[in-house]
Image: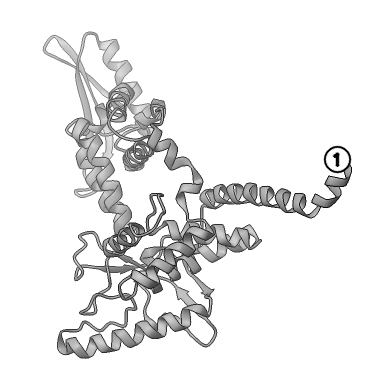
Amino acid sequence: MAYIYKRGDKWAYRAYAGKDPITKKDKQASKSGFRTKKDAQLAAAIFERQFHNGEFLEPSNVTFKEMSEQFLEHYLSQGAKISSHRARKKALAHIIDRIGTTPIQKITVKMYQDSIDALAKKYSYNYMASIHSSANMVFKYACDMKVIKESPIKGAKLPKQKKTVEELKEDNISEKFLEKKELEEFLLVAKNEGIEGDLLAFTLLSYTGMRVGEMLALKWSDIDFKNHTLRIYKTYYNESNNKKKYEILTPKTEGSIRTIEFNPVLDGLFEEHREFQEKNKQDYEMLYHDDEFIFTTKDGYPQTIKQISLRLKRLLEKTSIKKNITPHSFRHTHTSLLIEANVHIKEIQERLGHSDINTTMGIYAHMTKNMKKKASTKFGKLMNSLSEKIKS
């Protein structure tokens, strides 16, 4: 039971607060400044109830910045990818700039809401969603660690934003992939005007739907030329774009680990590329970093995603294509071609290693709409002679 006593002209209480985990000695919680003895007794009773129910929180001056650092360290220890860790750290930096020095126990709903309202004036809705979810992870971690009782995010709302013309354009699903005729134009330009490896890389991306990181992590041993299959179980990561500072990581999700068949048209392209690579090894001899990667620089290091993007940009400038195409667009292109070939949506999901198929469904809706138009046109042509007789 709490001890109530007078301290000067005010009242105070002292109560049992468990044992210190290190010294194993009893701990005491105390608080003073109460105007009357009854006020001190009431406060002591509330403390003891909270303590026995496991609801009491030790007063803490840990700031949001410090808690974020602890969370990020924990996030990595739980197996988060370095790329995901980097994205969370970058998103949290914006909240830290505003309330980083504030003790996390003193952050209110209004304080947090004011922060995201201000940030929403500078960043897109999608990026704000990333900032918001990252902050939520920190507050949840603080709750789990018994530093705060409840996350201030619970009462906060992500501001709605009107989309700009450019963002609306980006939402147009047809801008995310190449139509069959556009792909044909692009690959012929890659064949006739590309540098060594361009045709293989972009044909492989569009014919398999691989992520560009998965492609750059490919080694010759991952390909079964007899059965025309390739094994996808790793991805390339390089934060600095320094060719020597790359990492080979596990894929995005467990569903991303897969074995897929590839079109035999790639056989000849692989063969030509391997011959070029063997010659390169001889030219560079001892300087060649030989780790069996397929897509490499002249001295054998895996190409960077930036290099693939620059090659893509160079080729696009030689075409009539006006879309904002990225290496990832070839993944969506492959999806659209599978849909056009009447491949079932579940098979598409497995082939691409999708865990979230929202984009696939968007492309599916777009493609089926086009296919319905084509069906109507074909039917009209088929029935043209009968229609003429009906009209006359």
Q: Residue under label 1, please give it.
A: 391
Name the quadrant containing residue 52.
top left
Q: Bin the neighbour count of mark 1 within 10 Å (Cα to Cα): few under 14, some 14-19, many 20 and up.
A: few
Q: Residue at x 36, y 29 (%)?
A: 50
Residue 92 in the image, given as x and y percentages of width and height: 26, 41
Q: Nearer the viewer, residue 133 or 266?
A: 266
Q: Nearer the viewer, residue 67 or 242?
A: 242
Residue extending farthest left: 8
Q: Quadrant of the N terminus?
A: top left
Apparent side of residue 108 relative to residue 358 in the rendered image (left or right): left
Report the amino acid beneath label 1.
Lys
Q: In the structure shown, which secondary structural element does the residue marked by tag 1 occupy?
A: helix
Q: Residue at x 40, y 25 (%)?
A: 155
Residue 308 in the image, given as x and y percentages of width and height: 31, 64
Q: Quadrant of the C terminus?
A: top right
Residue extending farthest front: 392
The colour style of the image is one colour
Name the quadrant containing residue 315.
bottom left
Determine whether 228 is above or below 375 in the image.
below
Q: Residue at x 53, y 48 (%)?
A: 358
Name the quadrant containing residue 117.
top left
Determine whether 340 is above or below 143 in the image.
below
Residue 326 in the image, given as x and y percentages of width and height: 37, 55
- The answer to whether residue 27 is visible is no
Q: Nearer the viewer, residue 140 or 174?
A: 174
- The answer to whether residue 369 is visible is yes
